[in-house]
Amino acid sequence: MTNREISAVFDQVADLLEFQNANPFRVRAYRNGARKLKDLPQPLSQLVADGADLTDIDGIGKDLAEKIATLVRTGSLPMLAELEQQVPASVLPMLRVPGLGPKKAAALYNELSIASLDMLRAACEEGKVRELKGFGKKTEETILAGIALAERANDRIYWAAADEVVQALLDHLRPLGQVKQLEAAGSYRRGKETVGDIDLLADSTDVGAVMDRLGEFPGVAEVIARGDTKMSVRLDSQLQVDLRVVPSESFGAALQYFTGSKEHNVEVRGLAKQQGLRVNEWGVFRLTEEGEQGERVAGATEEEVYQSLGLPLFPPELREARGEFELASEGGMPDLIELADLRGDLHMHTNATDGKATLREMVEAARQRGREYIAITDHSKRVSMAGGLDSGRLRAQWEEIDRLRPEYDDIVILKGIECDILESGEMDLDDDVLAEADWVVASLHYGQKQPREKIMQRLLFAVQHPSVSIIAHPTGRLINRREPYDLDVDQLIEVAAQHNKLLELNANPARLDLDDSHCAIAKRLGVPIVISSDAHHTEGMDVLQYGVKQARRAGLTAADVANTRAWRDLKPLLAKQAADLPD
DNA sequence: GCCGTTTTCGGCCCGACTGTTTTCAGTCG
């Protein structure tokens, strides 16, 4: 089992325990463990085989260590089977109904034997739910309305889509004179690849005016809640927007609190407590001897909030309780990569295959964006739907590049190819033509459902091929639409490290592949990441910003990303002899 | 279930809002 699979088992255990009203700290222990394992650089199977002490992993104690060993050895966990006997897994979707938590869901299951969303809907329509103790007519209506939301499969939207809504909301609220500061917080600010809802924070003393203004935002379908400081609305698109209005002296504390993540905040507040301080969204406060809230020591800015706790101002992208506190205590907060650090773009298509723009148009667009070098990487012949290139057409394209090069002295145009890794495991083009290329991107397009062994055989063949520079979109996942291939990413990264190959972070907002935790593993193993646009038209080059967000979440600095280098400094990283490459 | 420069037991972040309550539990972030 992979680390992620083991992590998923612990998450499932946590869900079921929560449903059974187990000790919340026990539930948290499983969730914490799941999170730590997902981001672990070494495969657990290897650690178990080596007889390593798993309790060395932060958050893993004696009990979870034993369960990990059981999962590695047998592929299943008796405890999970037992839990599923007590509570069918079909109840878990009920927890996604807004307003339904473990307590209420358990009451529905225990009192009315409701074990699925369908049964829940029927019970609401028959008016049975309102008769339960602790439920009422209003709750029943809320549940009924919420079922539709829960049934919508995982509807977190791409960060790029959230960004459009956020900008519109900010533009709508900013002109209001009563608003002194305004920020979008939450997972949007942390740059997560998908965003579940939008969190806005306003600095104002006129709460009513700000809330009224949000209510007037075009596209507000309903007001879910509105209190003294907090308001929630749902947009026509079903997206929820939470607004919090605080005074200036609390803005920093509220921004810190509202940015999260929840796990990061739990850690921050725990650390505060050890120092006799209390952190909440209103500020940082000294605690009196009786444990009462005393004098305020910080709150106006995030920086002073963290500073008052002896912590650095964490970049929002790192606030996931995935090791940032350890980095801070070692004094090494990384200087994360920024969009402006990128100098080249090494994956793009033209109308020779499935791109929309000509070679010259792509070159011009790249120059306008200040790129110092680009690789033209059209598809190879097996990708017939895209009109992939055979060796003849590919060489013809390279001749066209030869003709263009003298016209541009401010951009290096690399002769590249996105060569398909065939189902058989061979490369789609002959070795002699691949050897002539400046830059070979290898990727899978077909046979994505093959068993892991076969997928890995293909990927490992490609990564060891002398002419291949990089593996593109290595896992093949499409966010919310397609699962990754059945592959062992850890092994792929290891072999890439052994053969001095690069791995792509495809910046398309639907791909973002490799993802943040895999990029972090690549960093630890010294595998350079290349952030590429995979542009199919000129505007497609602008997606690099999303790749940079993901890279920041992985803790990558400019030094970890190969295409932050000038072309002459990138060449030594490549398998190909620098002398065979253009200047 | 995890963890320990106050602890191997007794803690484990904190507050807003709603609905169903007569003073609070549940949910959410």
Image (cartoon, rainbow, N blue to C red):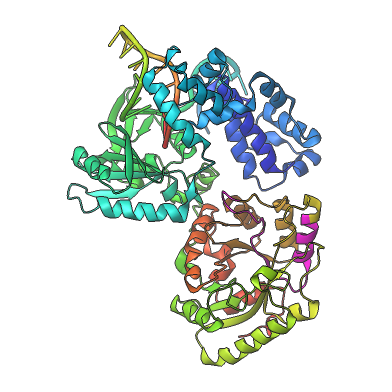
A479 part of magenta stretch: yes
Q: Residue at x 52, y 41 (%)?
A: A321
Which quadrant is the C terminus of chain A positioned in?
bottom right
Q: Is residue A221 left or right of residue A422?
A: left
Front residue of A276 and A354: A354
Front residue of A557 and A514: A514
Q: Is residue A500 above or below residue A431?
A: above
Q: Which residues are magenta?
A: A455-481
Front residue of A405 and A84: A84
Q: Residue at x 64, y 49 (%)?
A: A483
Return the x and y of residue A286 as percentages of the image width and height. 32, 30
Q: Is residue A209 above or below residue A451?
A: above
A534 part of magenta stretch: no
Return the x and y of residue A9 as percentages of the image width and height. 67, 34
Q: Is residue A583 above or below residue A146?
A: below
From where the camera sits, is residue A99 visible?
no
